[in-house]
Image: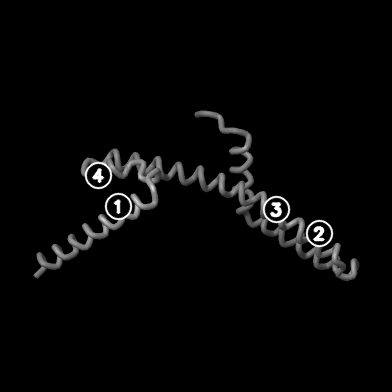
Amino acid sequence: MAHSSWFARFAKATARASGHAVTFGFAALVILVWAATGPLFHFSDTWQLVINTGTTIVTFLMVFLIQNSQNRDGAAIQAKLDELIRAIDDARGQFIGIEHKTDQEIQQIRADLEHLATELLVDLDVSED
């Protein structure tokens, strides 16, 4: 098994940790502590700026970490689907790597498949009569 980069390992661990209830609880606790300190700081602009800046920074960084995790998961799913298509005798190999096609090509393939599905349903309705 190949070793992943430090960023991939960090992103994976962070994404995993951010989905836990304990992490949510910690974030909620931070908000509660911040809110409780409002009267102490007279609900000042600086008091508000602290939470705004903190949440903005965390959100900004999490976007990149979560996107990395989604990219990796998406690539793994595509590889699994490609293997299933390859392994099934009647499957059309043209669908392997379809995620690399343009949006227009994918839309055309979907339209063709929907047309085939409609024809199949019509054929099934006729054969049932």
Kindly identify which numbered label has been placed on residue 109.
Answer: 1
Q: Position of residue 88 (x, y in %)?
A: 26, 42
Q: Answer with mark 3 or mark 4, whichever residue precedes in sequence.
A: 3
Mark 3–mark 4 Cα distance, whole angstroms, equals 45 Å
Q: Please identify the quarter of the rendering in which residue 45 is found.
A: bottom right
The residue beneath circle 3 is: 58
In this view, 52 is above or below 10: below
Query: Callout 4: few (<14), some (14-19), or many (20+) C-alpha neighbours within 10 Å?
Result: few
Which residue type carries mark 1?
A: Ile
Secondary element at tag 3: helix
Which residue type carries mark 3?
A: Val
The residue beneath circle 2 is: 50
Q: Answer with mark 1 or mark 4, whichever residue precedes in sequence.
A: 4
Query: Callout 1: few (<14), some (14-19), or many (20+) C-alpha neighbours within 10 Å?
Result: some
Mark 1–mark 4 Cα distance, whole angstroms, equals 15 Å
Q: Position of residue 12 (x, y in %)?
A: 59, 43
In this view, 71 is above or below 108: above
Which residue type carries mark 2?
A: Val
Secondary element at tag 1: helix
Q: Nearer the viewer, residue 114 or 82?
A: 114
Left or right: where 38 falls relative to 8: right
Disc 2 to disc 1: CB gap under 8 Å:
no
Residue at image location 63% in from the left, 40% down from the top? 10
Q: Answer with mark 2 or mark 4, whichever residue precedes in sequence.
A: 2
